[in-house]
Image (cartoon, rainbow, N blue to C red):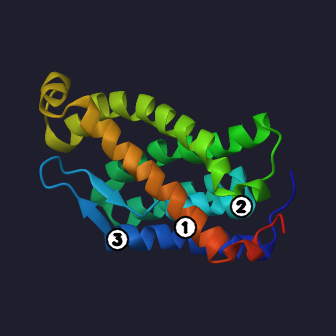
Amino acid sequence: MKNISSREIALLAGLASLSAVVQLIHLGYQSPQWGMWIDVVAVSWIMAFFLFGIRASLIVSLLGALIITLFAPDTWLGASMKWVATFPMYGSLFAYMKIAKKEIADYKKISNLFIPLILGILVRGLMVLPLNYFYAIPIWTGMTTVQAISAIPWYIIFGFNAVQAVLDVVLAWVVVFRFRIARFASWQ
């Protein structure tokens, strides 16, 4: 494992701070009926992957979730769910890259996102459904698991998470590769 340069530390700290700022101002859309958010908090977490790799995504996402928890204590539940839901996204990008013997630079071509994005959405859905029904919804609303399952259909949770996953990955891709932020990447 290579050491992280001071330049990378500064950029990772900036990306983690960015995720905390957009959480604190809560930039996004909240469903009035279900209360679920579509936001841009994890976009910088995926950007970290495109710029520096999996280790950077882990660092930025953990720092971002910690900052969110410290500065908005009522959102510790949201921070933990956001982290768990986003991990399959950069995890699938990393796994696909290793299995297909590709490099991060190969993600410049947007068609290379298709397979890892679909895989990430499926894994994310399999993780967030039980976590929502057994962990988040009962803590947040006080509903029992049975009440939560009958009140919020699985396809609503899966659908919101699929939309969030596409937004996170595609927006991060646009910022890094179309706005030429990739020139700061460690693989350049």
- Check disc 1 and give the amino acid type: Ala
Which residue matches tag 3?
A: 24
Q: Earlier in the sequence, mark 1 or mark 3?
A: 1
Task: Tell me the residue at 74%/61% (across/down).
Answer: 52
Gap between marks 3 and 2, in whole Å?
31 Å
Q: Is residue 81 visible?
A: no
| Amino acid beneath label 2 | Lys
Kindly give the residue lying farthest to the front in the view shown: 111
Near mark 1 (Cα within 10 A), the count class, few <14, some 14-19 or many ≥20, is: many
> Which label lies toward us, 3 or 2?
2
Kindly identify the amino acid type of the residue bearing the numbered disc 3.
Leu
Q: Nearer the viewer, mark 1 or mark 2?
A: 2
Q: Is residue 112 visible?
A: yes
Which image quarter: residue 32? bottom left
Query: Where residue 124 is drawn, which disc sits there?
Result: none
Q: Are marks 1 and 3 in contact (CB under 8 Å)?
A: no
Give the labeled residue for mark 1. Answer: 16
Q: Tag 2: Cα neighbours inside 10 Å, few (<14), some, or many (≥20)?
A: some
Along the viewing direction, whichever of 92 and 170 lies nearer the viewer: 170
User: Could you say where residue 53 lies in the image, as x and y percent from the top left?
Assistant: 73, 55
Closest to the observer, 148 or 122: 122
**Between marks 1 and 2, how big is the CA–CA gap?**
23 Å
The vertical placement of 44 against 36, above or below, is below
- Give how far across and how far down residue 155 sits, in percent: 28, 33
SS for callout 2: helix
Earlier sequence position, callout 3 versus callout 2: 3
Considering only order in the chain, which callout, 2 or 1, is on the residue closer to the N terminus?
1
Residue, disc 2? 108
Residue 174's spot in the image, x, y percent?
Answer: 57, 68
